Image: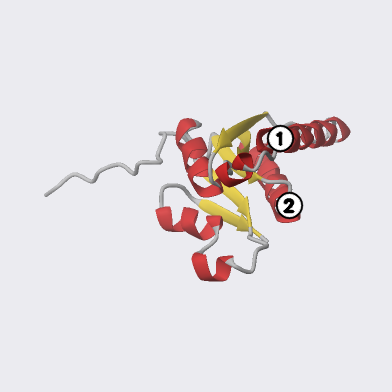
Amino acid sequence: MTAQQPHQFERGTDGPKVIVAGLDGSESSMRAAAYAAGLARRQGAKLALVYVQPVLPAGAALGAPIGDATAEVAEGLVSEIRAATERLKDIWDVRWEFHTFRGDPYNGLVTAADELKADAVVVGASESAGHRFIGSVAVRLVKAGRWPVTVVP
């Protein structure tokens, strides 16, 4: 008789302690963040909102200020989150953090979920038609099978 190995994502607690939500400013990612906030509130978990700053060497080679643009997106997302938190402070008691990672969205979210010891990952459904052929970030996260993944339309 062999002993069962514990699952990698098991932390020895009831319910998730850290929920990672991927944000990129799209409507579906904002809905995913709102959904993740509700999960975090109900579960008493910390919400880690993650923006992955794209690395675009081709744009940088042409002189485009890519780093400045992505930093502005991150700052705008944080401002939007803070404003929503302030508006809902009487009914929304959620511990949250905002993190930025660099890279492509899939690898950035994988790194974030690993480093933050995520118990669950929530992302928005892709709004790109091309993802039907090459696979969306959400599908790739599900196929990785490392965390429960919720995809919000």
The Cα atoms of the two marked residues, 2 and 1, are separated by 13 Å
Q: Quadrant of residue 83?
A: top right
132 lies left or right of 140: right
**Neighbourhood count class around disc 2 (C-alpha, 10 Å): few under 14, some 14–19, many 20 upward:** few
Vertical placement of residue 138 versus 61, above or below:
below
x, y percent for residue 117: 47, 33
Q: Check the image and name the residue furthest to the front.
A: 62
> Is there any visible trace of residue 118 in the rendered image?
no
Kind of residue at badge 1 = Ala
Q: Quadrant of residue 98?
A: top right
Which residue is painted at 52% across and 70% down in the image? 133
CB-based contact (under 8 Å), mark 2 and mark 1: no
Which residue is painted at 35% across and 41% down in the image? 8
Which residue is painted at 57% across and 34% down in the image? 101
x, y percent for residue 137: 54, 55
Front residue of 132/67: it is 67
Vertical placement of residue 89 versus 40, above or below:
above
Checking the image for residue 26, the label placed there is 2
Kind of residue at badge 2 = Ser
x, y percent for residue 54: 60, 42
Q: How is the image coloured?
A: secondary structure
152 lies left or right of 104: right
Which residue is painted at 41% across and 53% down in the image? 144
Which comes before the other along the chain, label 2 or label 1? 2
Q: Quadrant of residue 72?
A: top right
Front residue of 20/94: it is 20
Q: Which residue is mark 1?
A: 74
- Secondary structure beneath disc 2? loop
Vertical placement of residue 88 versus 106, above or below:
above
Vertical placement of residue 8 versus 135, above or below:
above
Quadrant occupied by the C terminus: bottom right
x, y percent for residue 91: 82, 35
